Image: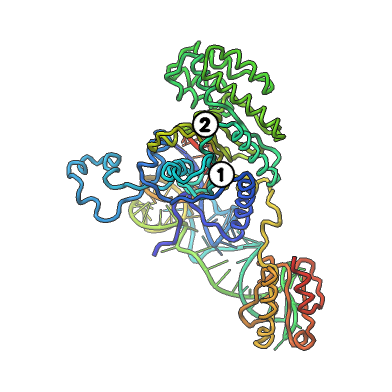
Amino acid sequence: MDKPSLPKGTRDFGPAQMARRQYLMETIRQVFRSYGFLPLETPAMENLSTLTGKYGEEGDQLLFKILNSGDFLRDIAPEKLRVKDSRKITPDISEKGLRYDLTVPFARYVVMNRHEIALPFKRYQMQPVWRADRPQKGRYREFYQCDADVVGTDSLICEAEIIGMITEVFAKLNLKEYSIKINHRGVLSGLAELAGVKEKETSLFVAIDKLEKIGEEKVREELLAQGFANEQVTTAFDVLTFSGRTEDKLKFLRAKFTGVPTGTKGVDDLTEVFRLLDQYGISSQHVDFDIALARGLSYYTGCIFEVKIHGVAIGSVSGGGRYDNLTQAFGSKERLSGVGISFGIDRIYDALDELKLFPESAQTSTRVLVCHFDEATRAYGLPVVKQLREKGVATEIYPDITKVKKQLDYADRKRIAFAVVIGADEMASGQLTVKNLATGEQQKKTIDELVASLAS
RNA sequence: GUGAAUGUAGCUCAGUUGGUUAGAGCACCAGAUUGUGAUUCUGGGGGUCGUGGGUUCGAGCCCCAUCUUUCACCCCA
């Protein structure tokens, strides 16, 4: 038998990690709920027809596909098999795939349940997604996304609230050094139009998205290599490299986009988002209007967001944006606009871990261990355990009869806060020995005193 | 998907130009202490050197393949 192992890019999460992950998820859930989002879960697998074509060509390549059940090769025409091109026979042998993100299944759900959904519909969803990527640090093949989306309204209040939620989540996590980058697809399209490269938008966006990472020179080289004309690139960079405060950027772009409706729409929306943040009293100190922010997912049409934590070598920990046509991709006749945000908790976990920001409270386990010496003292301890549990105190009793040393050792390893030692003396007097494992101090308490002191 | 690096005990790592039975620290288990953990002392278990081939009288060390992890590209949470 081979040594057991895990598929590439997947991980187990032990109790210590789970405590921290749950702390993260609970923090996010609390914020989502306070903004009026309600939970939704969808299946791990979707029909491939639901998934393909929504994420661009690259995305389709990264889909995990599920082999059909049964003897699926039997009915395939032999000449198809002879070609030995697995992509050609994929539709014949696979009709399901693992979900790639939570937004597309959400859009599918909205279209399927349109009749019973009250618009605007706000849902949050925290589930794993799968991507057949090559793993690296902060990049896994199975990871959790925590999404909140609103569908059925164009109001930019949603965008402002997304920024509000990000700000609140990060404040609760005690993360102070981060930036929320915001841009608008309209600004990017306007830019492409100005440069006269409207038909090659996508390759322009992909290139300028790397501006911060590889610098202006390299991006120029890449664009020229892709056949963009020198003056087109220069025009684009004139706009991209403008620096200044947000208001200055908006003013500058508004002037540039005279007679360019898509660009003007982008500037209008962003202006409105910043105005709403102000009215809401949501701090925009972490918000950074970045003209070069593009983001890959092809379905975005309006504002786009991306969040980076400073001081850690981890990609973006959160991203999102507005998408106008996603429900139409599922045959909806009605135009439903949606906007949402996704937190990548695996990356946030890595960042918090690296920055040592997990609070002590995120790693608590059992609070009390009841220790004993023999069957009689163990039996005496059982109702003590029961009483503590009824008061909501996480309590366990050492199941085997063994030396106190071993029982305390167990308590120490599990970082249990208190040990209650019950021997013949305690049983006779009713005064139990309560030991604080952190300080080592011991005192005698009756059962009632014990329960009262620990119940919160 | 493309290009590169890595892998020796549970963990972090030594291991000479290829040469006998592969080591350390920490961790683990047991005892010193039959009512007390985290500190001390003593002893113990544990490795087909990632896996499979090859070269050699002889491979942890050299060669090939494969897997894992990591890095860059691509893309992204």
Which residue is at 55% across, 26% downward? A184
Q: CA distance from mark 1 to mark 2?
A: 15 Å
- Dot 1 or dot 2: first in sequence order is 2
Q: Chain of mark 1?
A: A
* Residue A289 coordinates in the image, percent (x, y): 63, 27
Give the quarter of the image for residue A180.
Answer: top right
Answer few, some or many: residues within 10 Å of disc 2's Cα (few below 14, many 20 plus, some between 14 and 19). Answer: many
* Residue A70 coordinates in the image, percent (x, y): 26, 56
Q: Is residue A420 above or below residue A141?
A: below
* Residue A372 coordinates in the image, percent (x, y): 69, 82
A452 relative to A200 in the view: left or right: right
Q: Chain of mark 2?
A: A
Residue beneath disc 1 = A344
Q: Amino acid at mark 2?
A: Arg
Give the quarter of the image for residue A274.
Answer: top right
Q: Amino acid at mark 1?
A: Gly
Q: Is residue A14 above or below residue B32?
A: above
